[in-house]
Image: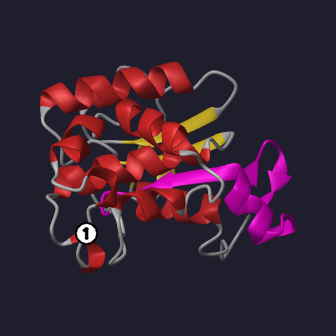
Amino acid sequence: PSGSGKSTLLRLFMRFWDADEGSVSVSGRDVRHVDTANLRELESLVTQETHLFHDSIRNNLRIARLDATDEEIEAACRKASVHDFVMSLPKGYDTPVGELGDTLSGGERQRLGLARAFLHDAPFMLLDEPTSNLDSLNEAVILRSIAEERAGRTVLLVSHRPSTMRITDTVVSVEDGRVS
């Protein structure tokens, strides 16, 4: 349920916050003992609200990996079911987006956030309601991509949607801050 602490757990994994009590470990290692720059390299985070900058779509994606080629950016966008949309824009990947991506819909911003995560290609993906703003067709394409991309990595997926949770190996419930 909403407000149970699922998004808080993701923020603890990313070390945006430190735990007041106990510890948070990734692969048996307390995240407080991992340099935050190294942690950012190991983790990709996709939230319900993707933050975009007043710049081109290409540059907003390249933030995930500065040395990414145009072909790698396109491949990531295909996985996130956003390439065709981008190509429908007058300037394609060079199309500027407004501050915070205000020229795009919530679903378009969310798919660009997923493309960033695919481009970053980190071994640990944290996905907080990654399909909350998407229709069922785009959700299905993205879930298939996530399922294909999870080989060799850990994917932590937070969702209220049963359709989203179908791709998981293990489901952990969080209610009132308690994990079960």
Kindly identify the residue that appears in the image at 23 percent across and 56 percent down.
91
Q: Residues within 10 Å of mark 1 (few under 14, many from 20)?
A: some
When the figure is inspected, residue 97 is found, relative to residue 110, above or below; the finding is: below
When the figure is inspected, residue 81 is found, relative to residue 33, above or below; the finding is: above
> How far from the left and from the top, in percent, is residue 135?
12, 36
> How far from the left and from the top, in percent, is residue 36?
75, 70
Q: Is residue 62 magenta?
A: no
Q: Amino acid at mark 1?
A: Val
Left or right: 158 with respect to 67? left
> How far from the left and from the top, in percent, is residue 15?
65, 68
Kindly identify the residue that appears in the image at 48 percent across and 35 percent down.
172
> How far from the left and from the top, in percent, is residue 138?
21, 31
Left or right: 12 with respect to 81? right
Q: Residue furthest front?
A: 91
Viewer-proximal residue, 70 or 47? 70
Kindly identify the residue that appears in the image at 61 percent across and 75 percent down.
17
When the figure is inspected, residue 87 is found, relative to residue 37, above or below; the finding is: above
Viewer-proximal residue, 89 or 144? 89
Q: Which residues are magenta?
A: 23-49
Quarter of the figure with residue 101: bottom left
Residue 16 in sight from this viewpoint:
yes
Residue 118 in sight from this viewpoint:
no
Disc 1 element: loop
Which residue in the structure is indicated by mark 1?
Answer: 97
